[in-house]
Amino acid sequence: NQTLTKPTENVVHDIPRVAIIGAGAGGSSAAFWISKAKERFNVSVEVDVYEKASYIGGRSITVYPYDNSSLPPLELGASIFVAANKNLWRASDEFNLTRQTFGAGGRAGIWDGEDLVFTFGDSWWDTIKALVRYGALAHKRTQQIVKAAVERYLTIYSLGSPKWDSIADVSAALGYSNMANDTAASFFAKAGVAKRFAFELVEGATRVNYGQNLDDIHALGGILSLATDDARGIKGGNFQLFEQFLKRSGAHIHLNTQVTNISASASPSTHWTIKSSLGEKHYKAVILAAPFHSTGIAIPSSLADSIPEQPYVHLHVTLLTTTSPKPDPTYFKQSSASVLPEMTLTTYEGVRIGKREPEFNSLSYHGLVREGEWAVKIFSKERVSDDLLFRLFSDQVGWIYRTEWDAYPKLTPTITFPPVKVDRAFYYVNAFEPLISTMETETVAARNVVDLLLREEFGASICGSHLPVSNSPENITITTTTATANITQDFVLGWDC
């Protein structure tokens, strides 16, 4: 906390103030985007960030095995980002943070609760096995679907990026509407992807990344669950990205501060009054960067009614260390001489035909914590008992750390989304989550919200006049102009203008 500024006193300021509620990916980056407008165009505004927790980072948290800070920290929450996540990638470069890989060439398996139905790696023999089991076209067709979706997404970082106050409109502009309004199971079937491939490999990805099955999650969630090539994390913990966003923003940061009420301001120069554990304060604008229904914040009933309740996946996370280099093969009905994969994904397909449900969503080794002792992360619907852990790792379990939380939104097929603009000068970053929920897309949604706020309340923007002024659907389209065509691949809107 040594980098944080002191809380400001509750006094009247001539300089307009913006309140940001939440210091995770969305809130911290929102403060950073505002600072970019201040830096480039001398926008006169001060920012207060309220966070009810004692730390910055939201769902990005690390813990140390045995509470020993000399051992490598382990990510408890949001773990990875990829090169297509241009804001986080650029931030790690700008902030001089070290990206680390998660190992290459490891093996993975698919467990259905009773049988290890498939194991695979990157050898020629694995390729032959996959061709025999899934056919020649399933993988290629899936790759094409993922590539096309990612290419559309990347236009968000270009000068031609849309500015939106409707998630449905930006979804349509990106070509995602059909994907968001169909289950992944249905979408992949229509695309000609073999059912076995979809319900084993694709479902394995949706269960580890979002805790949801292929016939529940929308197709866009299923597709982006597969866009994890060359995944990286920040050495020492991803939370450092969000600490740096805030440190460099110059915002006033209030940790351990619960906001309880947002109401219309009686002051002629402000729009909103915030009540918190620090008292009452007036603001020209408010950015809510946390899931509204989880905040406990009271707002006018007409506004609360406009934000549909978003169900979340309640996830159990178990971190542990073990001196067993692989899981016990007998648990998976393999011979004692078998060598199990470093990662076990799961499918619900066994349950659909009457088998027992897997006792976890995923199990993955995360490298050595010290010589002869490995770290393991398990995601599950229910608490994983000590008995199960000892069965999984041949009684060779050292340290255990458990937590549970609402990890990600249930990405059910939909055509309706929360409002981006709840009211005048009141914006909602997490409106984007039912479409795509990642650390990166929170920073993208925050950039969009900040640009809306600056344009509507300050006559300014993050990047001058590049973004479209109109929010009408016909103007929210993805185009390639001469300017955008000449921009290098390193260009990232917001960072660059």
Image: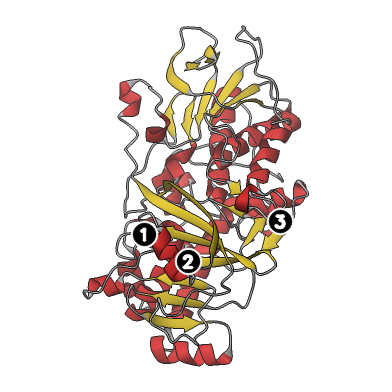
Q: Secondary structure at mark 3?
A: loop
Q: Earlier in the sequence, mark 1 or mark 3?
A: 1
Going by the numbered disc 2, the residue's amino acid type is Leu
Disc assigned to residue 487: 3
Residue closest to the far front = 395
Q: Which mark is residue 212?
A: 1
Q: Are marks 1 and 2 in contact (CB under 8 Å)?
A: no
Query: Is label 2 in a helix, a strand or a loop?
Result: strand
Relative to residue 234, is residue 364 drawn left or right?
left
Seen from this angle, which residue lies furthest left? 354
Mark 2, residue position: 363
472 horizontally vs 159: left or right: left
Q: x, y (%) of residue 468? A: 56, 41
Earlier-in-chain disc, 3 versus 2: 2
Q: Residues within 10 Å of mark 3 (few under 14, many from 20)?
A: few
Q: Horizontal and vertical percent for residue 316?
A: 42, 52
Judge by depth and name the residue closer to the eye, 248 or 458.
248
What is the distance, in whole Å, between disc 3 and disc 2 at their CAs?
A: 41 Å
| Mark 3 or mark 2, whichever is nearer to me | 2
Q: Looking at the picture, tell me which residue is in the foreground, 245 or 137.
A: 245
Q: Residue at x 55, y 15 (%)?
A: 278
- Where residue 8 appears, as percent x and y from the top left, is 65, 15
